[in-house]
Image: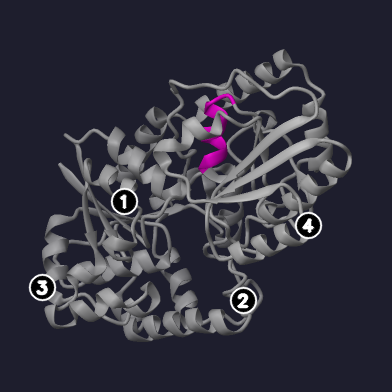
Amino acid sequence: MKTVLFIYRGLQVGGIETFYCRLAENYDQSKYNFRFLFLCERHHCDVELLARLERSAKVDFYSGYVAYNFRSLAKKLPVPLKMLVKLSSAAMEKLALEVDLVHATEGLGILLAQQIFKSSNKKARVNLGFYHQKEFSWGKGRALPYFERINRAALSGLSSRSLAFFNEGVAETVCGETARNIAETNVFPLGVDVVQSKNKNEFSEGKRIKIISIGRLTNFKTYNLWMIDVVADLVAKGYEVTYDVYGRGDIEAEVTEKVRASGAPVFLKGTLKYSEFSRVVTNYDLFVGSGTAIIEASALGVPAIIGIESIPDSKTYGYFSDISGFTYNELGLDLPLLDVANLIEGFASLSTEQKQLLGRRHMLKAELFSMEHCVSNFSSLFEATDPLALEVHNYSWLGYRLSYVMTSILSKLVKTSYTEKYN
């Protein structure tokens, strides 16, 4: 049996985190043993997700692996500052003995894996999942901080066989930027639970429309802002529209202020428990969003309008069910842009039967993203993972961490390229 260590920042309600829960629950535990190393603290995790994950995998926290004398300090520090407290040599040696390969989502995860294995006779076998297309390409054309230059060196140290892209668009972008052969990489969609006990059958009639978005309120999810204008315009035209937004994040104050200024019937509902997703979402007529949430909503038979990430205006590629392949929310796809307000007005004019048919088309689309297929694809990724070809002496681990911390602090104080990481 092989042990796979997943390194990630934290466990709040989000697309990656809920996916990790599904993956751990659906895996063949006679073949793989899953472990998770989170950079946050236990009390910062979503209680429900943590309990769910711990039923299928071992969960550890970064501060538990630092030297005992520094452990209480590490627990009090936020993630960027926590990185200044290095893992103890004894803890890293023990972890290296117990782990066979590492799954990372960013450069920091790759380099942490390398540090864990640096004193071991075992090679650091690391694979990388591209959960966002700009993870390694933000700040393009600008002078990058030291830590990001090392992140990109770490990426170059991974073989193409060790890379996983979750849609074709991200694969084409990254492979084009790094001169890799896309055929040598792994391209497959993230999985969702497509068999649901509760599906959407009833819809509001006439000009009454209940719309929902679920996801982090973060800068690249610009639809959380321009949907406020869309709703205000529809109300002015006589539509009985309500828009409920579930999620928290760094633009929450900006969204709140815009809602207040507009007077539109937009309501910020805070965090939605993942166990409540199906029950809540099926009460709405339309979903607007991206990530795995749009797939899960579609699996319930709720028609979903694609929220293109980082787009400044209220434009979309259309309904999720109308897009071929696995790429659907990246800005700049070779697809016509449609006006969101017009699309919603068109939806309102449909009969109940037509809305139900549209919902069934979304359910069929969601079946392409089944957990069964995803688990099989992750197995292939694990088997193909090669050793990391990056030497510890090629960079300064202390310099990397200092650069990471300073850039994080500066991004909070002044606008930098890092502030616009995903825009």
Specify the label residue 417 is tagged with: 2
Q: Earlier in the sequence, mark 2 or mark 4?
A: 4
Amino acid marked by disc 2: Ser
Specify the label residue 90 is tagged with: 3
Specify the label residue 262 is tagged with: 4
The extreme right residue here reads: 237
Q: CA distance from mark 4 to mark 3?
A: 57 Å
Q: Residue at x 43, y 22 (%)?
A: 195
- Per the rendered image, the range of residues in magenta is 292-301
Q: Is residue 383 left or right of residue 352?
A: left
Q: Is residue 149 magenta?
A: no
Location of mark 1 (residue): 47
Amino acid marked by disc 3: Ala
Q: Earlier in the sequence, mark 4 or mark 3?
A: 3
Q: Residue at x 76, y 41 (%)?
A: 335
Q: Secondary structure at mark 3?
A: helix
Q: CA distance from mark 2 to mark 4?
A: 30 Å
Viewer-side residue, 307 vs 256: 256
Q: Mainly helix, strand or loop, the magenta region?
A: helix
| Residue 338 visible in the picture | no
Residue 400 spot, x, y in % from top left: 39, 81
